[in-house]
Structures are given as structure tokens and as C-alpha cells.
């Protein structure tokens, strides 16, 4: 055989190689410069070259396409390749080249089997579905999906055309519009892959390597089987599939689907995101007008989307998220193997949940049996929900829970490497637990406070070793919210910071590290928005109106709902604490409104009533009828000059943005990137705007300053733009992001 | 004192018997065998101060494919038959043992302490306590080693150990919902309460809960795991079929030659007398190649023909301290020496027990692989045996997963499972261990070896090995 030699000949190729085994060409992808394979110009060129050789080689009857990287088939198209383009036409051309290449693959006279282990996303999935057959490993790392929509793009290499044919309209829309990852077993059920291979354990090689070899062996078997016509390419359709196909053959049914999907997208995205609408358009064009029109629509829309502000905002967030998943403080001297959490409330138990499932021994301490029981049940329930969704087995759930130790005393704290306190937000209580903890832990133990507003240096004032004191501000619900805000004081040691970041990363968090101060970064940005929201309500808007104004601006959760989620009592604390610290600049609505609510027991969702009434099992929430009277008592007169819907939106957003810029100006923030990530992932700043800093870059600092000055004239210094913002307004060439 | 005396007495005949055997061997066999016999690391595993424990006798019912002649019995019936067979063969007085231990895997809920029910039914004195152990496919190994422990500790002098498995009938339960309703019905006081409970029964209550030969922790069936294990070690379908054929061929030969003397005849109530295992079916490679994979479809390699089959059967052994055996006038068959239990990852190393237990028990005994004359490994799947052999032959595996400097080394095939194995003779989960130990004793005698080794894997990722020493002739 000349198989090996043909591999040797292509010494100039670095990303794609192949060898011929019997009559099957095994094509291997391996980007030498990266942990993952991406479809780059280089990869594309080499692949085309290799494919042409295979098609010309009579000794080759079929091919297997496989990656040499155990955890990754192809993670997607190279984003830099798209970002390097300066016009929509250029991007459209890229898309068309991709379409052309995959069309050749689809029409290949020799069957190509895609052997998938690890992530098969975006352009990788588009490549795979152009192949004649797909085999995937059942590994947890194997996921298929089209995440383009999350970058404000669409599957631009034939995906919008092939997916509907392969998995049907509803599934295709679901995949492309949510961008969610699909596990291998689900992909098999959907018809996205033909066959599954189980990952192997230890043998004569490492499990990862042997699994890859095995996948290849099985894929070769199948490739031969396809050539020998022993393995059919089309599976016999089940009854359900036949019925669905029949139903879909009616134009009015399809139109109904387009309409429904369009309606859903508009409802969820408020029309702020162009990509989902374009995806619907491309699919519709392909299905209704045929492939030529479909492919053209796909490539043109892809080009247009790549030039939108939304896409660059989302891509910016993607890069930021990647950056905030790294530990820029290096690896800590001592790994945290045992973590203790004080307070088994919502936050404490939430932190425990995301810690135990990473295999870290976790002590959850509370002061009462009832509190502890509730907290332990929360952890159990969180994990059990995963069992119900089949992402973990009941056995894994049990063995994860064995890492959790609930207790009422400080037993075993001498072995604890880090303590995170999540007790009541009261400096006296914080000092008390800090002293109790320091009396029992060993000297290396780190004390982290999960406070949302109390300055860490005030907490550290009671400490014997302030270098070991740090803030770790989690967001509720901890298992859902990705952000962790870490707060360091002047005295916090670098190793303490490195350790806190390492723990956060292990917990799967996106991390920003900020300086100390009242409210740090996130709470400080949120507080002025809260008081402004109260003012808007006092001025006569009802909570539903306030919510619709904020969500239509792009916030995933309306301002009134957000306060209910955070807790009215917490909001009072934040508003009062920060009001004291920052003075009249943090004024606006009357905090007494919130205080009255707390007195009446309206503490938000957790108490069943806040701005809204929460009843278990009811999806549509009604405005709390009793708040009308409270608001009436605190009624303020709206000034029509600054009270249009748009004005209200900009009053809320500008106070947020100004505070963020001030945090950067004061050095609380390390840079605009962390500022954007913190705002989007912690506070729900509209992702389509990319965060306060990217928003300023695209919207124009001068325009925002103009609006603020208009509000300043009515409300005073609450709307005074900070110096850095003024600098940017003055000089339009100044940008926060390059 | 007594044991020391016995040791010195025993040592004498050992050396003479060796001399005699060497003498006779020298006439009939080739030189290498001689050399091998002379290079044992240890003359005996007897240790001063440690009680010698012996296997007096071992029997088993014929192992039958489940659903055949035993179909209408219950598990304790099989155990009873084995116990009666042991009594017959040894003429043991019915009150002469101190304790009875049985192993079983799939429990019949009515006879959860199957050891006691079987012992009573077999006519043993009702003064003899009995308990049941479970450790998957090494349940009767556990029964035997528990017996060894009782004797070594001086608690007992004579113990009957055994195992049984009855796969023709397995407990199929009502669904949890239905059970809950039925239990609530028990407690319901008024007719109204009862009627409302009965009224709450829906179709979904009626679907039964079937027992599966699957790991609880991973939900993977054993056959599936075996297929993955075979693939992990690159064991081909051909290798597996060849090994399965070897097992059946050797078993057939052993059966025809009358070597399986542990098998008793059993008059099955309401049916015929059975006296032979009925699962031995030497086929051809061509026939075996036709079968489709049973677990991993369509590319798997484990088939019905290269796996052990569901089997009904029971076994029993009589274990005593050497003094007791000699005092009762028995001629023991073998010494039961060192044993180990191991366990590993129940997902990816489910069936690698022998690989881990073999070197461990050899080290314990101070022997090397070449000291062993007779190997009896439990054959769960041909792929499992081949994977274990490859693991034992791999330096990389030994270093990476076992913390060894080099590979374990493999047993030579000319000493390995020469009378068939679980693949061909059958594998009643709870009963196989006793068959392995008895077979080693019989083979040592027949083949003139000194040391034998039993190794087995079990569900839960566990494993076992035991060294057996021939009793001087």
C-alpha cells in the first residue's frame, strides 16, 4: 500500500493529513497552533486539496473524516477570519466559498463518514452534515450545535439549507435559533447522526486515545459497509416522521410555523437581534424557493449580519468571556480542597451546589437545624433536577452529595482551605463570624465574604490576617448566574486572589476581579438604576410598564421584576448603604417606598409578594394590588420634558453607564472588558449592546452625554457625566474597545 | 502444639511423595517439566503458627441452561441438591459441621437466607447455623473464604460453603407506584379509603419492574461493558470466538473423559435424573461467525456464543481444619491458602478483577506466575478473558493503572482452564466459585501439579483470587 507514503508526500500540509487504510482514506484534521480545530483559510485550503486528491485516487473508495484532537472535532469557523473582513461583500464571499466546498462534499461520489468525538459546532457541524454519514461518540464532550446565533450570525456554510431537510423544520429552527448544544444521544434521536459509539475505558492506551482509534476503526467499517451497500444511508422513517413530513408538505402548515417562530423570536428578542430573523428568512427562502435562492440568501444575510453592531457586541462578549475564564493571577500556592460555607441560605446553598459537583469537599454551616435542612435540600434538589434531565445519573448525584457535609458547629474547620461567608448583610455579624472563623482555622485559610455591598476593607478591619480576606460576590441563583465578582483590598495578597479566582473557575464561573469600595462594581452600577426605577414608579408608571420599557431596551429581566428577584429588603440595604457612601448622586426615588413594602412583608419573590404577586404554579404574574396605595402616598410629579418612554429608558441606562465609566475612572475596574462582562453576565445589561463600554463606543459618548445633560437640568447631579465619559464625548476617536 | 506436630508429620510425606513423583515423571515426561517442578519458589505454603485449612470435598449439581430441566424448582432446591450430594459423597454425619454459608446473587424473596432453608431441607441438623452472602459472581468464593476465616479464627472446625443460582425464575416486582398503593391498602381502615386507593390505580401502575444484569451505579449491562472492555484492549471477534470454541471443546473432552467428577446426579422432582451439564456445545468458527453482536450493535464483538449463558445450578464444598479432617478420617483434596479481594472502577474496569487479583495473591503467597501449575479463571465472556490476558501482558497497563514496574505476565495457555470454563460449563452466578476451587483441586491431582490459582471478576468492579496447594498424595 502506498497509504503511508501519500501522507508523507504532503509535508507542506500542516492542518489536514490522510492515510489510506485498505480502500478507505482516513482524513485527519489537526490545527497545530490551537487546542481546538477551527475552519480557517488554511484548514479550508488544505481540506480542498486533500479532497481533490482523494477523488482523483482510484485506490480510494470512501473516506473517514476525523479529528486528531480527542476533545474536539471542529469547534466552528475561525471568528478572526470573519472579523478580518471589512465589508459585507467580503464575508458573503467567505460564506460562498464554504458553501461551495461543502456542496462538493455533499455530492462526493465516494461516501464520506464524519467520525465525531468532542465538540462539533458551527462550521464543524455544517461540514459534518454535508458528509454522507455521521458517527459520534457518546462521550459527554461530544456536542453538536449551531451557536452562530449567539454571535449575532447565522450558519453560513449551508447550515440553514441542510439542517431543515435533515431534522425537520421545528428541530432545525430550535437548533439554529437557540444555538444550544445537543448531546450525542439526542442528536441520534433527532436524526442528526446515524450511529453512536461508546467511549472506551483504559486498555492498552489512554482511554481518550483508544476511544479515538476505536471511533476510527468503527467509522472505517461503516465506510466499507456503505460502499458495499450493506449499510443504508437513509434510515427507514418512523411513523411519526412520516406523519410530520406529510403535514409539512402543506404550504399553509409551513407558513404557520414561520409565523409562530417569527412571533416567538420577536417576543423574546424584542426585535433587537437581527440574526434570528435572518435565520428564519434563509430557511424559508430555501424551502419555498429552492436551493439556489436559499444559498444566496444565506451567504448575503451572513455577510450583512457580520457587519452589524449586534454581532460585534456579541462577539466582543464571547472574547470577553473567554478572557474572564482565565486566571491572570497565576496558580495559587495551595489548591483549595476543602471549602466551608457559612450560612445555608439561598446563596450559601447555591455556592455549595456549584462546589460539590466539582469534587471539592464542602462544609455547609448554619446556625439552626431548620436553616441547614433547607440549604441541604436546596443542594439536593438542584442536583436531582439534573438527574431528572438526565445530565447526571442518580448514582453520580449521590456520590456528588457525599462531598457535602452539613453542620452547625466549627468541627473540622482546621482542615478548611477557604471559608466563604454568606451570612446576613450586617457588618457586626460579619465581624463576629470572621473572628469565630479565625479562631479555628489554620493560618493558610482564606476568608471570603459573599457580600453584595459592604466594603471588604471594613470587614477585614476585624481580621488578624487581612491579606487572607477577599470578597467573592456571587449572583442569585448561583447555579444559573455565570458571573462571580471578586473584590480585592489593598491588603489582599496576590496568592489569596489567585486562589479565589481558581475556586471560581472550578465552580464554572466567569470572573471579574475589581477593586474595593461601596458596592464594588456591579452593585454600584445597579443601585442608581434601582432608585431611578423607583422614581419612575413614583412618577406614575406601573411595574408592568417599567418592565416593558427595560426589556424592550434589551434587558432580559424588567427592572421591577429584577428588584423582586433581588429582594426588596436587599434593595433597601443597597440603596441606603450606597446612598450614605455616595450622597446625593445616588438619590432619585424615595427609598421609603421600598421600606414601606418591607414593613408590609412585600420582600419580593421569596416572600410571595413584591411589586408582583407570586403564586406557585402560576406563570402569569399580576401586579401586587396593594402597592398602588403605597405609590400613591409617595407620588411624584413627572416632568414631561424627560418622561417620554425613550427618556425613561435613557434615564435608567445612562445612570448605569455613567457609574460603570466612573468605576473605570476610579480604578475599581481593571478595564472596560471586565466592565462589560460584569454588567452583562451579572446584571443582565442588554447583550446586544455588548455591555456599557461597548454601548458607548457604538452609540457615541457624545450622544449619551447630551441626553444626560438634558436630564441633569431637571434632576441635578444624579445625571452629571463623569470626567472620563466627558473625555470620550469630547473626542470621538477615543474608544473603550479597539 | 497439635498443629506444629501435624506440620512436621506432614512435611515428611511431602518430600517423599515429591521424590516418588519425580522419579515416575522422569521416566515418562520431558526434561523441561522436571526443571519446572524443581524451581518452585517455595516447597509449601504452610506457615508455622498458621492453621492448615483443607478442602475435603467439592460437588455441584449439573449446570443447566436456565429454563430447562430445573425450570420448576426454587433456588433452595438446587442448593439442597448440592448439599445432599455433598453428604452422600462424604458420608458426613448430619451434625458434624459447625456452620453453613451459601452465596447467591438473585435473591428469591421467600428464601432470602437460602443457606438456612437449603440446610434444613437437606436434612442437616437444625442446630447448625447458616447464613447467606452475596458478592455477585464471586459469592461462593466469599462463602468459602468466610468459612476459611471462621476456621482460622478458631471459631469452627468444619464448615460447608456453597453457592446457588436460579435464573429460570427471577423476582419480577410490581412497579414502585403499585407497591406503594398496595402497602397503603394494607393500612386502609375503611371501605371508602380502600376503594379510593383501588380507584387510584392507573395503567402505569401495572407495568412491572424487571431485574437487569446491569450495574446499579452505571446502569450499563455487563455484556455491554464486556464489549467495551474487549474494544479497549483491541480484542478481535475472531480471538473471542476462538477462545469460546476452546472452552467448549475442552469442556466436551473433560466431560467425555469423565474428568468432571464434582458433578453429582440429581433426580429432579417431577422430571428426570440429570447427571450432565447441558450447555456444552462445541460449534465451528463458521457457525459462531454468523452470530450478530448481542450488546453493541452492529459493530460490537460480544455475541451469545462467546458469552457465558444464563444458568441454573448449585455447588457445595466441605472445608475443615486439617486436624479435624484427619481426625474424622478424611483424605483432604487440597489446602486453601492465600486469597485476596480487589475492586476497581465499575464502569471501565468492571471485569478486570483477575488482572488485579492475580499478582496480589501471588505476592501474598510469595509465589511467581511460573510456580502455578493449574489456572482456573472464571470465564464471564471470552472478550473479558482475552482483555484480562492482554492487560496482564501490558507493561503500559501495569505501570499506568496498577502502580507496578512492569507487566503482571500471563498464565501459559497449556495450564489454563483445561477442563472448560464458565463459557461452556455454564455460570450460575452464585455457584461458580466453588466449581473453580474444586476443579483446581481435581486438576492438581490429575495433572500432578503443586500450586493452583483461582481468579474471578464480579459485578461492581470486584475481583478475587485464591492460591490452592495440592494435598500430598
Image (tube, coloured by chain):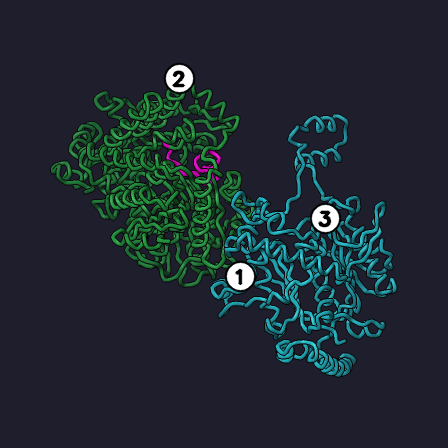
Chain colours: A green, B cyan
Q: Are marks 2 and 1 on the same chain?
A: no
The residue where tag 1 is placed is B390
Q: Is residue B388 magenta?
A: no
User: Which badge, 3 or 1, is on the more N-terminal residue?
Assistant: 3
Report the Cα–Cα distance between label 3 and label 2: 59 Å
Is residue A518 visible in the rendered image? The answer is: no
Residue A622 visible in this rendered orientation of the protein: yes
Residue found 36% across the figure and 62% down from its top: A333
In the picture, which quadrant includes the N terminus of chain B?
Answer: bottom right
Q: Are marks 3 and 1 on the same chain?
A: yes
Residue B65: assigned label? 3
Residue at (35%, 49%) from the top-left corner? A28
Height in image: A233 above or below A361? above
Closer to the camera in the image, A291 or A399: A291
Q: Nearer the viewer, residue B108 or A282?
A: A282
- Mark 3–mark 2 CB contact (< 8 Å): no
Secondary structure category for the residue under label 3: strand
Of badges 2 and 1, nearer the viewer stands 1
Considering only vertical position in the picture, is A724 above or below A253? below
Give the image location of residue B425, x and y in percent.
Answer: 70, 55
Mark 1 crowd level (few <14, some 14–19, many ≥20, 10 Å Cα): many
Distance from disc 3 to disc 1, alpha carbons, whole Å, reads 30 Å
Q: Which residue in the structure is indicated by mark 2?
A: A251
Residue B216 relative to residue A358: left or right: right
Residue A54 on image: x %, y %? 33, 44
Measured in 3D between alpha carbons, the distance from the residue under mark 2 to the one under mark 1, in whole angstroms, is 61 Å
Amino acid at each position: 500500500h502506498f497509504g503511508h507514503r501519500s501522507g508523507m508526500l504532503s509535508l507542506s500540509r500542516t492542518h489536514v493529513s490522510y492515510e489510506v487504510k485498505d480502500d478507505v482514506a482516513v482524513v485527519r484534521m489537526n490545527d497545530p497552533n490551537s487546542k481546538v480545530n477551527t475552519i480557517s483559510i488554511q484548514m479550508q485550503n488544505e481540506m480542498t486539496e486533500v479532497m481533490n486528491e482523494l477523488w482523483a485516487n482510484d485506490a480510494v473508495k470512501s473516506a473517514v473524516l476525523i479529528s486528531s484532537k480527542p476533545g474536539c472535532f471542529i469547534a466552528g469557523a475561525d471568528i478572526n477570519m470573519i472579523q478580518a473582513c471589512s465589508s459585507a461583500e467580503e464575508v458573503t464571499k467567505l460564506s460562498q466559498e464554504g458553501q461551495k466546498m461543502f456542496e462538493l462534499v455533499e455530492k462526493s461520489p465516494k461516501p464520506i463518514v464524519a467520525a465525531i468525538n468532542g465538540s462539533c459546532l458551527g462550521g464543524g457541524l455544517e461540514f459534518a452534515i454535508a458528509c454522507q454519514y455521521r458517527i459520534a461518540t457518546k462521550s459527554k464532550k461530544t456536542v453538536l450545535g449551531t451557536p452562530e446565533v449567539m454571535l449575532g450570525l447565522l450558519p453560513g456554510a449551508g447550515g440553514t439549507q441542510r439542517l431543515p431537510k435533515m431534522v425537520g423544520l421545528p428541530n432545525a429552527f430550535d437548533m439554529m435559533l437557540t444555538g444550544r448544544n445537543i448531546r450525542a444521544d439526542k442528536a441520534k434521536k433527532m436524526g442528526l447522526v446515524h450511529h453512536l459509539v461508546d467511549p472506551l475505558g483504559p486498555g492498552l492506551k489512554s482511554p481518550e486515545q483508544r476511544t479515538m482509534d476505536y471511533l476510527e476503526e468503527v467509522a472505517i467499517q461503516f465506510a466499507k459497509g456503505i460502499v458495499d451497500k450493506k449499510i443504508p444511508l437513509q434510515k427507514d422513517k418512523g411513523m411519526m416522521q412520516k406523519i410530520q413530513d406529510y403535514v409539512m408538505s402543506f404550504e399553509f402548515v409551513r407558513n404557520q410555523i414561520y409565523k409562530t417562530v417569527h412571533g416567538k423570536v420577536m417576543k423574546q428578542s424584542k426585535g433587537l437581534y437581527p440574526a434570528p430573523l435572518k435565520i428564519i428568512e434563509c430557511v424559508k427562502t430555501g424551502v419555498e424557493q429552492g436551493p439556489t435562492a436559499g444559498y444566496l440568501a444565506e451567504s448575503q444575510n451572513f455577510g450583512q449580519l457580520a457587519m452589524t453592531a449586534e454581532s460585534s457586541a456579541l462577539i466582543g462578549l464571547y472574547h470577553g468571556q473567554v478572557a474572564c475564564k482565565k486566571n491572570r493571577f497565576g496558580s495559587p500556592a495551595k489548591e483549595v480542597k476543602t471549602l466551608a460555607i457559612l450560612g445555608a441560605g439561598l446563596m450559601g446553598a447555591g455556592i455549595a451546589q456549584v462546589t460539590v459537583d466539582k469534587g471539592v469537599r464542602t462544609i455547609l454551616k448554619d446556625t439552626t437545624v431548620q436553616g441547614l435542612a433547607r440549604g441541604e435540600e436546596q443542594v439536593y434538589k438542584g442536583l436531582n433536577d439534573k438527574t431528572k434531565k438526565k445530565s447526571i445519573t442518580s448514582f453520580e448525584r449521590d456520590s456528588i452529595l457525599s462531598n457535602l457535609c452539613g453542620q452547625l458547629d466549627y468541627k473540622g474547620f482546621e482542615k478548611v482551605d477557604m471559608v466563604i461567608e454568606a451570612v446576613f448583610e450586617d457588618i457586626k455579624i460579619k465581624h463576629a463570624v470572621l473572628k469565630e472563623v479565625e479562631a479555628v482555622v489554620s493560618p493558610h485559610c482564606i476568608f471570603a465574604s459573599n457580600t453584595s455591598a459592604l466594603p471588604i476593607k471594613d470587614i477585614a478591619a476585624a481580621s488578624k490576617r487581612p491579606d487572607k480576606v477577599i470578597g467573592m460576590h456571587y449572583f442569585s441563583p448561583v447555579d444559573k448566574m455565570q458571573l462571580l465578582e471578586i473584590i480585592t483590598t489593598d491588603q489582599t495578597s496576590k496568592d489569596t486572589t489567585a486562589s479565589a479566582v481558581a475556586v471560581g473557575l472550578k465552580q464554572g464561573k466567569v470572573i471579574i476581579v475589581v477593586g474595593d469600595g461601596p458596592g464594588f462594581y456591579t452593585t454600584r452600577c445597579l443601585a442608581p438604576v434601582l432608585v431611578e426605577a423607583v422614581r419612575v414608579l413614583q412618577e406614575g408608571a406601573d411595574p408592568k410598564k417599567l418592565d416593558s420599557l427595560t426589556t424592550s431596551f434589551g434587558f432580559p429581566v424588567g427592572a421591577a421584576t429584577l428588584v423582586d428577584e433581588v429582594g426588596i429588603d436587599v434593595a433597601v440595604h443597597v440603596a441606603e448603604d450606597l446612598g450614605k457612601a455616595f450622597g446625593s448622586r445616588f438619590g432619585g426615588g424615595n427609598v421609603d417606598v421600598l421600606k414601606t413594602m418591607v414593613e408590609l412583608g412585600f420582600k419580593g419573590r421569596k416572600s410571595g409578594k413584591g411589586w408582583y404577586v407570586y403564586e406557585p404554579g402560576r406563570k402569569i404574574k399580576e401586579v401586587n394590588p396593594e402597592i398602588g396605595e403605597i405609590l400613591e402616598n409617595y407620588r411624584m410629579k413627572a416632568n414631561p420634558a424627560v418622561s417620554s418612554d425613550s427618556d425613561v429608558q435613557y434615564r435608567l441606562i445612562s445612570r448605569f453607564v455613567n457609574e460603570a465609566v466612573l468605576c473605570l475612572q476610579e480604578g475599581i475596574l481593571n478595564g472596560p472588558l471586565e466592565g462589560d462582562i460584569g454588567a452583562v453576565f451579572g446584571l443582565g445589561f442588554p447583550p446586544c449592546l455588548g455591555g456599557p463600554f461597548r454601548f458607548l463606543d457604538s452609540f457615541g459618548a457624545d450622544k449619551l452625554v447630551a441626553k444626560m445633560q438634558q436630564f441633569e437640568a431637571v434632576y441635578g447631579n444624579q445625571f452629571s457625566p463623569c470626567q472620563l465619559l466627558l473625555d470620550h464625548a469630547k473626542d470621538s476617536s477615543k474608544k473603550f474597545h479597539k | 502444639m497439635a498443629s506444629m506436630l501435624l506440620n512436621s508429620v506432614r512435611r515428611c510425606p511431602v518430600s517423599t511423595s515429591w521424590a516418588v513423583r519425580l522419579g515416575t515423571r522422569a521416566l515418562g515426561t520431558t526434561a523441561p517439566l522436571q526443571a519446572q517442578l524443581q524451581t518452585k519458589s517455595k516447597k509449601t505454603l504452610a506457615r508455622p503458627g498458621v492453621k492448615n485449612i483443607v478442602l475435603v470435598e467439592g460437588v455441584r449439581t449439573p449446570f443447566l441452561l436456565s429454563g430447562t430441566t430445573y425450570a420448576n424448582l426454587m433456588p433452595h432446591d438446587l442448593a439442597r441438591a448440592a448439599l445432599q450430594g455433598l453428604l452422600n459423597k462424604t458420608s458426613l454425619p448430619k451434625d458434624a459441621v459447625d456452620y453453613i454459608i451459601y452465596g447467591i446473587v438473585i435473591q428469591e424473596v421467600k428464601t432470602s437466607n437460602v443457606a438456612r432453608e437449603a440446610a434444613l431441607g437437606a436434612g442437616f441438623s437444625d442446630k447448625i447455623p447458616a447464613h447467606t452472602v452475596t458478592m455477585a459472581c464471586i459469592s461462593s468464593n466469599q462463602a468459602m473464604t468466610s468459612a476459611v476465616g471462621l476456621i482460622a479464627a478458631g471459631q469452627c472446625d468444619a464448615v460447608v460453603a456453597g453457592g446457588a443460582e436460579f435464573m429460570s425464575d427471577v423476582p419480577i416486582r410490581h412497579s414502585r407506584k403499585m407497591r406503594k398503593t398496595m402497602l397503603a391498602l394494607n393500612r386502609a381502615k375503611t371501605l371508602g379509603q380502600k376503594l379510593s386507593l383501588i380507584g387510584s390505580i392507573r395503567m402505569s401502575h401495572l407495568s412491572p419492574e424487571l431485574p437487569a444484569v446491569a450495574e446499579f451505579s452505571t446502569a450499563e449491562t455487563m455484556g455491554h461493558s464486556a464489549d467495551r472492555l474487549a474494544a479497549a484492549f483491541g480484542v478481535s471477534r475472531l480471538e473471542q470466538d476462538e477462545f469460546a470454541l476452546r472452552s467448549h471443546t475442552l469442556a466436551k473432552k473433560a466431560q467425555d473423559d469423565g474428568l468432571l467428577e464434582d458433578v453429582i446426579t440429581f433426580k429432579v422432582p417431577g422430571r428426570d435424573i440429570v447427571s450432565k451439564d447441558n450447555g456444552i456445545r462445541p460449534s465451528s468458527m463458521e457457525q459462531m461467525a454468523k452470530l450478530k453482536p448481542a450488546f453493541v450493535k452492529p459493530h460490537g464483538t460480544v455475541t451469545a456464543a462467546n458469552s457465558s449463558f444464563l444458568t441454573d445450578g448449585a455447588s457445595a464444598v466441605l472445608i475443615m481444619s486439617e486436624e479435624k479432617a484427619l481426625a474424622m478420617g478424611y483424605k483432604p483434596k487440597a489446602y486453601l491458602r492465600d486469597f485476596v479481594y480487589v475492586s476497581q472502577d465499575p464502569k471501565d474496569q468492571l471485569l478486570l478483577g483477575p488482572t488485579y487479583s492475580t499478582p496480589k495473591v501471588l505476592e501474598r503467597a510469595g509465589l511467581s506466575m511460573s510456580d502455578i501449575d493449574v489456572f482456573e479463571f472464571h470465564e464471564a465472556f471470552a472478550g473479558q478473558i482475552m482483555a484480562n490476558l492482554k492487560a496482564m501482558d501490558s507493561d503500559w497497563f501495569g505501570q499506568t493503572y496498577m502502580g507496578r514496574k512492569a507487566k503482571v505476565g500471563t498464565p501459559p495457555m497449556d495450564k489454563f482452564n483445561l477442563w472448560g470454563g464458565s463459557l461452556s460449563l455454564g455460570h450460575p452466578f452464585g455457584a461458580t466459585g466453588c466449581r473453580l476451587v474444586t476443579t483446581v483441586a481435581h486438576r492438581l491431582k490429575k495433572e500432578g501439579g503443586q500450586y493452583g490459582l483461582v481468579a474471578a471478576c464480579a459485578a461492581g468492579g470486584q475481583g478475587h483470587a485464591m492460591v490452592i496447594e495440592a494435598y500430598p498424595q
